[in-house]
């Protein structure tokens, strides 16, 4: 048995769902966003930014771990959104996500918002 066989597949670390279409889209990530799984989130965000999106919400309310790779994905998506004049919101509920965003200064840069992780998306003012 090798060490790599002990690591869970990337698809088990994080899942990403996209809701909405056209100009208003929500990308919801669940699980762990680390160096192995961050590319999954990156591809989902890039796919939306390749489209006709004007408002992009990144919901990290169900993310349990966020490391530097995930932070880089969010920063890159933000840079691209600014260039494309796309309004991007980042939502977070757990300390595991909020704290890394705050420490790096991304919390303010991304205009991130704290949400109640137990509330449904409709209750958070986001359709």
Image (cartoon, helix red, strand yellow):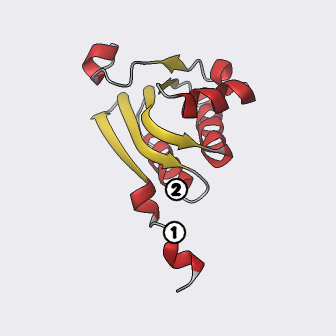
Give percent across and percent down for residue 100.
Answer: 66, 32
Label count reads 2
Location of residue 78 (image quadrant): top right
Picture quadrant where residue 57 is located: top left
Q: Give the side of residue 103 with respect to residue 50, left or right.
A: right
Residue 107 position (above or below residue 96)? above
Q: Is residue 49 visible?
A: no
- Residue holding disc 1: 7
* Helix, strand or loop at mark 2: loop
* Residue 69 seen in the current view: yes
Callout 1: few (<14), some (14-19), or many (20+) C-alpha neighbours within 10 Å? few
Residue 118 percent coordinates (x, y): 32, 24
Q: Determine whether 9 is above or below 64 in the image.
A: below
Which numbered circle lies on residue 114?
A: none
Residue holding disc 2 = 37
Residue 76 shown left or right of residue 13 in the figure: right
User: Residue 17 appears at what percent x and percent y?
Assistant: 33, 43
Residues at discs 2 and 1 in contact (Cβ within 8 Å): no
Q: Residue at x 46, y 62 (%)?
A: 10
Where residue 103 appears, as percent x and y from the top left, is 73, 27
Task: Mark 2: give few (<14), some (14-19) or many (20+) Cα within 10 Å.
Answer: many
- Quote the CA–CA distance across marks 2 and 1: 12 Å
Q: Residue at x 67, y 27 (%)?
A: 106
Image: 49 above or below 95: below
Find the residue positioned furthest to the right: 104
Q: Secondary structure at mark 1?
A: loop
In this rendering, which labeled residue sits more in front, label 2 or label 1? Answer: 1
- The residue sitting at 64% across, 39% down in the picture is 71
Q: Earlier in the sequence, mark 2 or mark 1?
A: 1
Please determine whether, in this image, residue 49 is positioned above or below residue 1: above
Q: Quadrant of the C terminus?
A: top left
């Amino acid at each position: 048995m090798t060490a790599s066989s002990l690591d869970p597949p990337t698809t088990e670390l994080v899942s990403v769902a996209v809701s909405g279409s056209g100009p208003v889209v929500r990308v919801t990530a669940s699980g762990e966003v680390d160096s192995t799984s961050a590319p999954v989130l990156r591809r989902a965000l890039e796919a939306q930014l390749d489209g006709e999106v004007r408002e992009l919400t990144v919901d990290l309310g169900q993310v349990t771990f966020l490391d530097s790779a995930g932070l880089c994905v969010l920063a890159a998506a933000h840079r691209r959104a600014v260039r494309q004049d796309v309004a991007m919101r980042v939502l977070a509920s757990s300390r595991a996500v909020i704290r890394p965003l705050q420490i790096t200064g991304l919390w303010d840069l991304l205009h991130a918002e704290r949400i109640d992780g137990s509330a449904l998306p409709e209750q958070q003012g986001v359709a």
